[in-house]
Image (cartoon, rainbow, N blue to C red):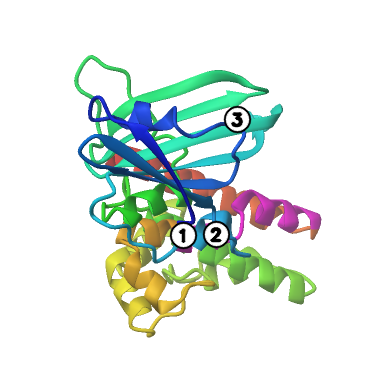
Amino acid sequence: MPHLTIHQLANMPNARDFIQLMPLEDEFMLYGFEPNTDFLSVHVTALPEDSRTPAAGLFGICLPESWTAVGTVLSGTATHPEDEDSLSSKARVRLVVTRSGDSCTELSLDGAIVNQQPPSDSNSRHSPEGEHDHVHPTQGMITDCLHRMLGLPSPGAAPSLATLVVGVWLNEVMQSAMSLEEVTWERAVALHPGEPGLGSVSPSLETMTEATFRAADQLDWERMRRRAARGEFQATALRSDEAEWMDAAMFGRWVASSVPDIPAILRTLHRLGADHVAEKISAVLQSVQQARMNAD
C-alpha cells in the first residue's frame, strides 16, 4: 500500500480502536494495520477499482501475517431495508475486521453517527444467551473480502441453494415468456430444474416445493467452487483464481447475486399478461420460504 502513517501504541488496539484511525471523509479507502513493539503502522490506499463491483478489486489479495486488521471506508446513499425510502444521500460506513475474527462497523448519516456495532466474533453465528441477536454489519462482498484477505472464513452461512434453483427457474420462465406469444403454467412447470412432472393433473404446491428442494440437494456450493477454481464451471464474471481464493459461503453469495431479481421477474410476467403464471409462482415461492423456515 503506498501511504503509511505511524501511531504510538500504548495498548494492543481492538476493532473499535482501529475504526477511529480511519477518517470518515476518506471514502473508498482501504486500511491495513500492522502493530510493532511500540508503534502501529497504518497502510492506506484507495480501494482498487473494478467494473464488476467495488468489492471485486479486493479479490485474491492476501495480507502479510504481521498485519492484524484490515478496514475500509465506504460512502453512498442509505435506504430503509423494508420500504426502500431514502434515509440519507450522505451515508458513510467504516468497517474493520481483525485477524482474530472480531469485527466492528460504524454507520454515519449526514455526518452523525447513528449506529455502531461493537466488536464481535464474526465466526460465531449466535449471540450469547440473553443478548440481542445482531445482523452481521454490512454483510456482503466487502465484509467477505476483508475476512478472506486475512485468511478467515467468510461470516455466516452460504445462501440457500433452493434460492438459486428458484432464480434459475424464474429466469427460464421469463425468457420463455418474452420469446413466446403466451406462456402457460404447464410451460413454466416443464422448465423447473427439479422436473416436478406433468400428468393429467397439474403438480400440487407440495410437489413443486419438493421438486425445488430435490434440485437443490443435487448442488453443493463447495463442490461448485472447486469446479470453478479448476475452470470446469463458469461462474458469472469470476476468474478461476478468484474462485480459488473464495470460500464456499462467499462463492455462494457471489453466484446467488447474479441470479435475476425475483420481484422484478414477477413484475415482468404481469406486464406480459402472464398473471396466472406469476400468481402460481408466487405461491410456490411462499411455500419454499415457509419450508425453509420450518427446517431452521
Q: Which residue is mark 3?
A: 82
Q: Which residue is mark 1?
A: 58
The kind of residue on which mark 1 rests is Leu
**What's the residue at 51%, 61% (across, down)?**
56
The kind of residue on which mark 3 rests is Glu
Task: From the top left corner, tell me how far across and down residue 122 is, in percent.
Answer: 29, 38
Region of the chain picked out in magenta, as a range:
254-271
Q: Quadrant of the N terminus?
A: bottom left
User: Nearest the camera: 178 or 66?
Assistant: 66
Q: Judge from the rendering whether residue 193 lies leftward or rightward of residue 83; answer left or right.
A: left
Element carrying mark 2 = loop
Element carrying mark 3 = loop
Q: Which residue is mark 2?
A: 48
Q: Judge from the rendering whether residue 182 lies leftward or rightward of residue 205; answer left or right.
A: right
Task: From the top left corner, tell me how far across and down residue 199 is, in percent.
Answer: 48, 71
The kind of residue on which mark 2 rests is Pro
Residue 41, magenta (yes or no)? no
Residue 93 in sight from this viewpoint? yes
31, above or below 110, in the image = below
Distance, label 3 to label 1, CA atoms, is 29 Å
